[in-house]
Amino acid sequence: MVQYMTVSPKAIFPPRKRRPSAGAFIPPNFADQKLVQSLLLLSQEISSIQPFQFLLRRTSLSIIRKTKLLSILFEELLRNPILIFSPTLLCFEEMYILLQRIRTLIEDCSNGSNMWLLMQIDSVANGFHELTVELSTLLDIFPLNEVDLSEDVQELVVLIRRQCSLVKPDLDPGDSSLRREVLTMLDRIKREIVPDQPKLAEIFQRVGLQTAARCTEEIDSLEEEVQNQGDEKSKSEVIALIGLVRYAKCVLYGASGPDSESQRSTSKDMTAEAATNIPPDFRCPISLDLMRDPVVVATGQTYDRESIALWIESGHNTCPKTGQNLAHTSLIPNRALKNLISMWCREQKIPFELTETSHKSNGVSIPNKAAVEATRMTVSFLVNQLSGSQSTEAANGVVYELRALAKTNSDSRGFIAEAGAIPLLVRYLGSDVGSELPNLQVNAVTTILNLSILEANKTNVMETDGALNGIIEVLRSGATWEAKGNAAATIFSLSGVHSYRKRLGRKNRVIKGLVDLAQLGPNSSKRDALVAILTLASDRDTVGRLIEAGVVEIVAGVLDSLPEEAVTILEVVVKKGGLAAIAAVYNKIKKLAVLLREGSETSRESAAATLVTICRKGGSEMVAELAAMPGIERIIWELMGSGTVRARRKAATLLRILRRWAAGLDPSPILERPNTTVSGTSATTVM
């Protein structure tokens, strides 16, 4: 008889969302012996799984034991091959489907959330019972007398049949009691009653969440569970559990270190290699992260829904990338791009979740009262911990928890600021902290960045003594590139308020810090700096300071590595910077012309717009430089045929400028025409 090695369910089943595979419910099209062999392998796989350790232990043990006994029947059939008649074949096909369903249910329970399993304990136990009843039915119709089996195996089949028929729905009283206790605790939290810590510890021990790492895994599982729920009530219940687990993790097991958390986050979202190789068109121009729900705004630019919605909700009426006013604020789903991103994620083995099922609804944070109060209690606990005297190592753990919490939703950001965390975080921005514990400086500035996403918190940050100077210090002399990049991202976030944008643009230390980072940092940090520069450049007074700081040369230097960001900045600077900017960019005209042919859709559009401005304001010398490039008219023609609406319009204007120059006329009077097509040597306007 085969010896089985008992293993953990998580070792057998890779983590996945709770969706049964299509093959689990389709009868296999196998020959006789191959079908029996598949049944044996499937039963052995189920038999090698450990029973659940904390919930439904007796139920899982019972069905695993029965499956192990069944494997002996299949072994016997393989040792003594026989011709399987139609009734037996049908029974075996149904048996294969049933075992697949058993495997799927065990997999779901093993890889899912313990807390959500506890909430669904009655229905899950009934599911196991129904599978056992179906197994009993299949064994009843199994033609035992028509199959040549040994006497021992025949008796075994009869035994399994009897066991299945005697089974009744059986839920461990301890599981039911535990469920009631969790619901009671959630109800007390809803009424703003802080949980009794010994009772909280007892519940989390019984449910199998005995360490900070297990609580972190549980939060991940619950966040995936939100995606699986189709109705708002169930989503709300899961979100309440997330709040409870996050609170318990901090109170019972202390703030976890950032190293393990960072590794977990990286492995969950994407591999490090894939993260650095995201195609530029798949990144949101605002967050620079992989877009999960790309949408198109009125200017034709594409952003991730969450980022652009937050931008618009903050009071902006312009396109962040082009600076143009938005004719309307409707967000149109870019389904074609979403499909491409989804396909790329599957190839890279990166989870691709849609943000339509986010915890937010119409920009409003978590609606569940228990979740809101649990979050408030968690924030209060962490801020109290941070305000006490403690080592930098201990502070680092607390700050990291605040960083993670500030990333989740608007409620958390509001609670953290209201609790007075920002002045406490400022203490960890200095260079002394950066030299002693670089991670603490990174976590502090990143927490402030996450808090600043909430519009009300921008004022809190700007008005807190030392906060802005601390952010600028990290930007200029942060201990790591990550710290500098996140400081630049904070500058970008704060500059979303017009008055703050002008104030930040007047600070030479901000301009110098961003320009230096754009020149010297790695690509990820350069992007943060370039996005902040682009936002500040929307203020005409700031453009002069940027030009004096050498922004044109720096940006031109990254045209090859970061073309979209670089060319967009050039477009804005050239448009608002006057002759000084035009002169500075003279030697880069040919690079821009190359982008017309080889760049992405967005960079081609910005390159065309930049060249139009250069040629208009720079005079004949600039036009001559462009005209000297071999095949330039052909490149412009191609853009007129395949570019965006704005790119085609700019290309048509550029072509008219070149032809006017070739005819010996001044190119500067050329004005753009709406929707132009060019035929032969004349341009015709399409109404």
Image: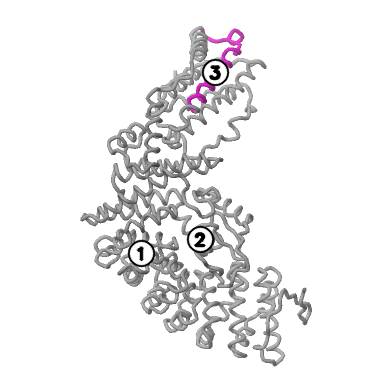
Select label 1 or label 2 by which is in front: 2
**Image spot of residue 557 (x, y percent):** 47, 76
Q: Nearer the viewer, residue 479 or 229?
A: 229
Q: Residues within 10 Å of mark 1 (few under 14, many from 20)?
A: many
Mark 2 falls on what kind of element?
helix
The magenta region covers 124-150
- Left-right relation of 68 to 303: left
Which circle's residue, 1 or 2, is located before the other in the chain? Answer: 2
Quote the CA–CA distance across marks 1 and 2: 23 Å
**Image spot of residue 259 (x, y percent):** 33, 52
- Left-right relation of 317 to 551: right
Q: Quadrant of residue 50?
A: top left
Which residue is disc 3 drawn over?
133
At label 3, which amino acid type do we have? Val
Determine the residue positioned at 43% across, 82% down.
545
Q: In the current view of this chain or complex, which residue is farthest to the front?
A: 191
Looking at the rendered structure, which numbered label has been put on residue 47?
A: none
Determine the residue positioned at 43% across, 28% down.
49
Residue 510 painted magenta: no
Q: Quadrant of residue 174?
A: top left
Q: Against 138, is 360 above or below?
A: below
**Image spot of residue 326 (x, y percent):** 60, 68
Q: Quadrant of residue 437?
A: bottom left
Q: Residues within 10 Å of mark 2 (few under 14, many from 20)?
A: some
Which residue is disc 2 drawn over?
310
Which residue is disc 1 drawn over?
483
- The reply to whether callout 3 and callout 2 are in contact (CB within 8 Å) is no
Determine the residue positioned at 58% across, 51% down.
343
Magenta span: chief secondary structure: helix
Select label 3 or label 2 by which is in front: 2
Q: Against 630, is 641 above or below?
A: above
Which circle's residue, 3 or 2, is located before the other in the chain? Answer: 3
